[in-house]
């Protein structure tokens, strides 16, 4: 128990307090401490990468083995991960350490250009369809607050496109909708965002103190 | 939910998806004319800030985006890089996003080819380092120690593009082009600590989050979404991808506004008839 619980708690407390204190100390040792922390972060991050990869592959292997619905998609995880790792290690025959000449398009680059770029862009851009459908189905003027939000949303959406200047021009001021959008962003939006940020910050401080003082221990696993 | 309602919902969704697809594809294919527009105030602030720097100044450009938001943020990145080269400024590019380096490398090489500039001399792409805020903090101590080599494995010590630059304190402007909340990180650990002015280019959905910083002067200007990029192109007297995207955005926003208004008119009629609460 001492090994599993007390040592991690002491480590978290010591590193947490040191990281907090160095923020307020302009001495050279504080700078060196920061650099070392970054180095440690990178080292630990590298281990986390392996754990993440193992976890991902293990999950998908389990799906394939049990033939759960949609298991065939998991095969693509192995193909994609295996393929990218292979071409990354091969590195045009130079191995994973030596860089190929600047400007040379490697197989890794091609994987990035023809797999990662289109796939991530497709997933992100498909949100436009969901958002349009959700806005059509749920954005309703049910009460005064909803009407205000609806009008504000429509004005901001309209004020962000050049065609608003055409309609504004007919009404006497081409930049009318841009100006209204600016007012909405700079006052009501600002007030709401600031309140949310302050709330989040207070929550983060409270949570950090709970972790530093060992009250919050869920990061150690085991649910205690 | 009754079967009829489910069928209706599926049918409605399909129609909306088709309309959205048409609103995006048709204006792009037929090259609809773009109505003339004025650059918004915030884009002017970013432009003026870059414009005010003397030749030879170092501008740190943190490119914190990946292909997800390439359509929105790449035109911004390219616009700022073109502006820097036109003003003889020296961009120092960096990222803390692990998917970004190949994309940024592509952008750098495209603009370098277009402007005849050389990596290591006229600009430098330092590459990616894990650690997020820690990277910013250590760059505040020493850029060369944080990035001993650049993205192309060239040693950063004695690199002409970094001559006279030891840390973030020595750059004249920090520009963050970001898809997420990494702008906060650069403000908190970079510009605020070291008193270096910062401007940002973000996706349209992230822009509202930056207004508190704009109000306090911690962010000097914002390029918000594709419109922000189009404004920047307008200020540079160019018409590139962002300006062309304005046709698509105008039609797509118009469709969305029409859908919302249509749905509400239907809702109010149904409520008047007692069919909706």
Image: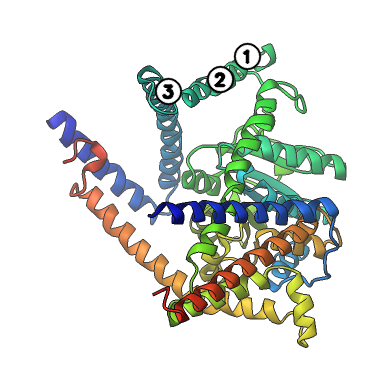
What whole-number distance in Å separates the C-alpha atoms at marks 3 and 2?
Answer: 13 Å
Where residue B104 appears, x then y in whole percent?
68, 40
Mark 1 and mark 3 lie on one chain; the one further toward the N terminus is 3
Placement of B103 over or under B210, stated as above or below:
above
Comparing B189 with A18, the one in front is B189
Mark 2 and mark 1 lie on one chain; the one further toward the N terminus is 2
Placement of A222 over or under A202, stated as above or below:
above
Q: Are marks 1 and 3 on the same chain?
A: yes
Q: In the picture, which quadrant includes the C terminus of chain A?
A: top left
Report the residue that reaches farthest toward the bottom: A172
Comparing B161 with B183, the one in front is B183
Residue beneath the point at 20% across and 40% down: A9
Mark 3 and mark 2 lie on one chain; the one further toward the N terminus is 3
Question: How many marks are shown on the rendered structure?
Answer: 3
What whole-number distance in Å separates the C-alpha atoms at marks 2 and 1?
Answer: 8 Å
What is the secondary structure assignment of the residue under circle 3?
helix
Horizontal side, residue B24 vs residue B195: left or right: right
Q: Are marks 2 and 1 in contact (CB under 8 Å)?
A: no
Residue beneath the point at 21% across and 48% down: A216
Q: Which mark is residue B182?
A: none
Disc 3: which residue: A57
Disc 1: which residue: A90
Q: Quadrant of residue B103?
A: top right
Comparing B74 with A206, the one in front is B74
């Amino acid at each position: 128990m001492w090994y599993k619980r007390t040592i991690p708690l002491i480590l978290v407390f010591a590193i947490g307090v040191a990281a907090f204190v160095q923020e307020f100390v302009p001495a050279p040792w504080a700078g060196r401490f920061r650099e070392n922390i970054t180095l440690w972060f990178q080292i630990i991050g590298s281990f986390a990468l392996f754990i993440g990869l193992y976890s991902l592959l293990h999950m998908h292997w389990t799906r394939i083995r049990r033939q759960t619905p949609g298991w065939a998609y998991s095969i693509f995880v192995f193909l994609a991960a295996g393929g990218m790792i292979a071409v990354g290690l091969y590195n045009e025959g130079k191995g994973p350490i030596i860089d190929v000449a600047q400007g040379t398009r490697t197989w890794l680059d091609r994987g990035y250009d023809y797999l990662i770029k289109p796939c991530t862009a497709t997933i992100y851009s498909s949100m436009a369809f969901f958002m349009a459908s959700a806005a059509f189905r749920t954005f309703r003027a049910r009460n005064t607050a909803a009407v205000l939000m609806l009008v504000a949303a429509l004005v901001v959406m309209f004020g962000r496109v050049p065609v608003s200047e055409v309609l504004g021009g007919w009404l006497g001021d081409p930049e009318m909708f841009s100006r209204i959008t600016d007012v909405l962003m700079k006052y009501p939006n600002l007030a709401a965002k600031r309140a949310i940020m302050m709330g989040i910050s207070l929550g983060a401080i409270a949570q950090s103190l709970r972790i530093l003082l060992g009250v919050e221990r869920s990061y150690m696993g085991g649910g205690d | 939910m009754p079967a009829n309602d489910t069928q209706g919902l599926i049918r409605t969704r399909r129609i909306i998806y088709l309309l959205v697809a048409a609103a995006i594809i048709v204006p792009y294919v037929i090259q609809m004319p773009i109505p003339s527009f004025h650059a918004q105030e915030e884009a002017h602030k970013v432009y003026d800030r870059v414009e005010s720097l003397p030749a030879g100044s170092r501008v740190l450009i943190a490119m914190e985006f990946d292909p997800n938001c390439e359509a929105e943020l790449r035109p911004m990145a390219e616009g700022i890089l073109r502006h820097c080269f036109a003003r003889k400024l020296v961009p120092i590019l960096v990222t803390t996003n692990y998917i970004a380096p190949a994309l940024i490398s592509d952008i750098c090489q495209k603009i370098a080819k277009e402007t005849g500039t050389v990596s290591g001399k006229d600009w430098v792409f330092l590459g990616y380092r894990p650690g997020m805020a820690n990277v910013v903090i250590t760059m505040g101590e020493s850029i060369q120690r944080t990035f001993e080599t650049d993205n192309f494995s060239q040693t950063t010590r004695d690199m002409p593009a970094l001559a006279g630059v030891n840390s973030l304190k020595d750059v004249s402007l920090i520009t963050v082009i970001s898809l997420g909340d990494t702008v906060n990180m650069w403000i908190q650990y970079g510009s605020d600590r070291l008193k270096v002015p910062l401007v940002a280019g973000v996706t349209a959905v992230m822009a509202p989050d930056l207004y508190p910083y704009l109000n306090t002067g911690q962010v000097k200007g914002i390029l918000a979404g594709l419109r922000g990029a189009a404004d920047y192109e307008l200020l540079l007297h160019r018409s590139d991808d962002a300006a062309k995207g304005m046709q698509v955005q105008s039609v797509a926003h118009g469709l969305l506004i029409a859908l919302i208004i249509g749905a509400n008119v239907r809702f109010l009629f149904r409520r008047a008839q007692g069919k909706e609460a």
